Image (cartoon, helix red, strand yellow):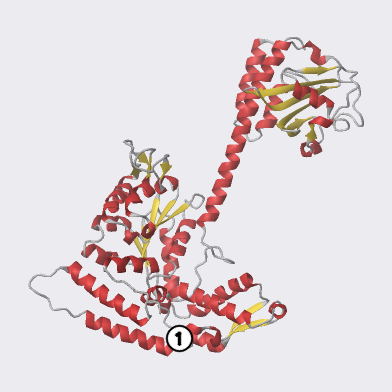
Amino acid sequence: MNNLTDSQLLELSIELAQSVASQQRFDDLLTAIRKVIICDAIVLLAYQGDCLKPLASQGLDVETMGRRFMINEQPRFNAICQSKKAIRFPADSSLPDPYDGLLTVTDGDLPVHACMGIPLYFEDKLIGVLTLDSLSPGVFEQITERSLALIASMASVSLHTASTVDVLEANVSRSKAVMRALSEPSVSGSHLEIIGKSHAIEKLRNEIALVAPSNFSVLIQGESGTGKELVAHSIHQQSSRADEAIIYVNCAALPENLVESELFGHIKGAFTGAESKRAGKFLIANGGTLFLDEVGELPLAAQSKLLRALQNQEIQPVGQDEVINVDVRVIAATNRDLKTEVDVGRFRADLFHRLNVYPLNVPPLKAREGDVSLLSGFFIERTKRKLGVNQLKISPELMAKLQGYDWPGNVRELEHLLSRAALKACAKVSAVNKHKEIVTINVADSDELNDTTSTINKHHELNATNDEAKTFTLEKSVNLRTLMDEYQRRVVKQALQLHQGNWSKTAKYLSVDRANLIRLSKRLDIRVDKVVF
């Protein structure tokens, strides 16, 4: 082949550019080069420090792609990597050829042939090597240095671009996989399965299946520990957005002065401490689902900004003038009665109606007849794997206790109780027998249920106190917020006294989150003094 014409080089440039966008980008790059340089074998290798890794090859055995050629062990590769321009090895070169025995058109050692190597540089850094072999000696001698330099330059740019695209696609694929994994609740042995066969749960499943394919906002309401987060994940996984992320936001944990930044993001310098630009949860969830847990805890100032995002599907990062359009489905959850919160002025009515497009109520465990035994089996099987036990079972006496308890902490309380009881039961069995025998969980392993009657009586006593607290003498003018605060103050104080100031037990007893209870108590000026003797 004589000097390549300008039209051939232009055609090569166009084909190299097109090859970058294809799925077989490296192989297409070689095909484009072979259209202007006739050869029997061509290989594209990436430079990785002390070795060369094949990215694509044509005319060599498939096994070539699995090889990693150490540069200091291969004189020809070493010479190419040390050079700044193409090297054409003499047909009778004594240097060993790294492709001996790999050429598909011949067996054994390569006969006298033409061999050329082109180092590929990008911004003065070696990024790869292109090798060409032909059984026709001297064929590469006819190509001018100018043509080879142009081919090397175009191939270098194409290799760099193709490698960058390859890495970006791999990162995107990995990010999606990670987000899908992070979006799934930690349910072992069941992919987003809501356990239960009660009428209440069957009704909930049907409603989830109905609303999931739509883009309606969903408001999930229910007591603490009923599984509202699992319901949100189930809606997302059954929607058309299942391949995108579901981003979780705990509204109760957001500091009031950072709510806007967390939800909508901020630019660098927007406020003290904003040292870099940050994307908000709405932008991160773009194309997917945003799950706002404990949405009833949002301060009123943040509620108005959330309303705008829901109405117009646009956000405005703190400190930025331009708005950003987003495509986000919002699922909210709360253990509060938002209608009551609206009535007393703690939640915006317009935001409530915007979130409450399709309401879902998650039933408490005590309303799910027959589900305690199914849930117990599910949790015990999962606990068995965690503890490395051959088999775990619940004694009939304990199961009767479980089914007779009213579960103020709902499913979460059942799960934690069984985990503790299983741990205590396993502690009574030797390590050897634990892996061979059946470990039975008895009533004695569950301290919380040893005196169920006493607990229920205490519950009734507190209810009686609550009934008394409901009686107020109404004057001509009353402040509803003050009356509500006084009622809550009396109930919380009684519950704390009942549980000797233990916040965790009190929260469980009142079926509220511990952090929310402490936050409420601070607002109501309720303190628990610890006395050291």
Q: Residue at x 63, y 79 (%)?
A: 426
Q: Tell me if 511 is positioned left or right of 382 in this view.
A: left
Q: Residue at x 44, y 87 (%)?
A: 452
Judging by the rendered image, the residue that carries numbered circle 1 is 404
Q: Residue at x 62, y 24 (%)?
A: 157
Residue 184 in the image, given as x and y percentages of width and height = 52, 58
- Number of residue marks: 1
Residue 205 in view = yes
Front residue (pair 449, 88):
449
Residue 402 in view = no
Q: Tell me the kind of residue under disc 1.
A: Gly
Front residue (pair 378, 97):
97
**What quarter of the picture does the N terminus occupy?**
top right
Q: Quadrant of residue 517?
A: bottom left
Front residue (pair 161, 499):
499
Instruction: Say which element carries label 1.
Output: helix
Front residue (pair 306, 457):
457
